[in-house]
Amino acid sequence: MAQWFRFEVLRRMEACGLVPTANAKTVDDYLRIAEALMRGGVPIIEILLRSGQMEIPRVHTDAIYELRKRHLGTNDLLVGCGTVHTAERAQTAIDAGAQFVVSIKVVNTNGILAIPGAREDAQVRTALKLGCWVVKLFLPVPTLDPQANIVPMRQFRDIFPRAEFVPTGGITPENVGAFIREGYPFVLPSIVKSEYVAEKAWGKITDLARTFCSKVGEGRS
């Protein structure tokens, strides 16, 4: 795959401002989740593996494949895979059609955008050495108050000016605007709540996606 592809994926993430994760038990649920997100203005889904899974469950790869197949003609949905801990698992996701992977072990290869996660300086340095420049940064302070996190996150940006950080963990409609105003290109929020999936409350996912989109717009205005 051409190297320019990963830059196009990144451009679309930045245009949306949101990259939500999802975890479900059936392919049909993933299809419904993607539809709900798109109705809410978020044409991106990161299919999330559970920590500790040794292999990518078949339902995840089947969902990636089916979503890509359904949107191949229009190319209006970005499909990725997250919490990928090995290069082998990343390749499995890519073979299924993943357009990006969120992984601490995988570099930007074959034109696929890799976004490693980091909590500390050493992990950011490792990501940069591997050729990654977009890094998922877990909020340093366990609070929903964005101001408590913005200062320590600025320190990461000062230390690593070549890195493009994207915040995750504790992103809400109430605080997302603050991170957008701070200049982060996009965030990784929790829009697809586990209880919504369990209840098959697809409308609630759409409503929350719309709320997040509105707040991102306000942050950019």
Image (cartoon, helix red, strand yellow):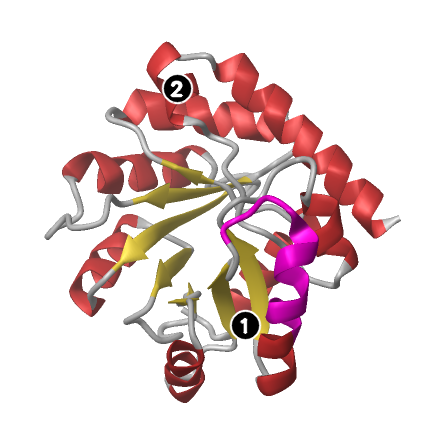
Of circles 1 and 2, which is in front?
2
Q: Position of residue 35 (x, y in %)?
A: 51, 25
- Looking at the rendering, which quadrant does residue 25 occupy? top left
Range shown magenta: 142-154
Q: Position of residue 96 (x, y in %)?
A: 27, 49
Q: Residues within 10 Å of mark 2 (few under 14, many from 20)?
A: few
106 vs 16, left or right, is left
Can you say whether 119 is above or below 181 in the image? below
Residue where numbered disc 2 is placed: 195
Look at the numbered disc 2 and give the secondary structure of its residue: helix
Q: Which mark is residue 95?
A: none
- Rendered residue at 40%/69% (across/down): 1
Q: Position of residue 109 (x, y in %)?
A: 36, 75
Relative to the observer, which residue lies in front, 49 or 63? 49
- Looking at the rendering, which quadrant does residue 176 occupy? top right
Determine the residue located farthest toward the right in the rendered image: 221
Residue 143 is a magenta residue: yes
Q: What amino acid is labelled 1 in the image? A: Trp
Q: Main secondary structure of the magenta part?
A: helix
Q: Position of residue 34 (x, y in %)?
A: 47, 30
Q: Which mark is residue 4?
A: 1
Look at the numbered disc 1 and give the secondary structure of its residue: helix
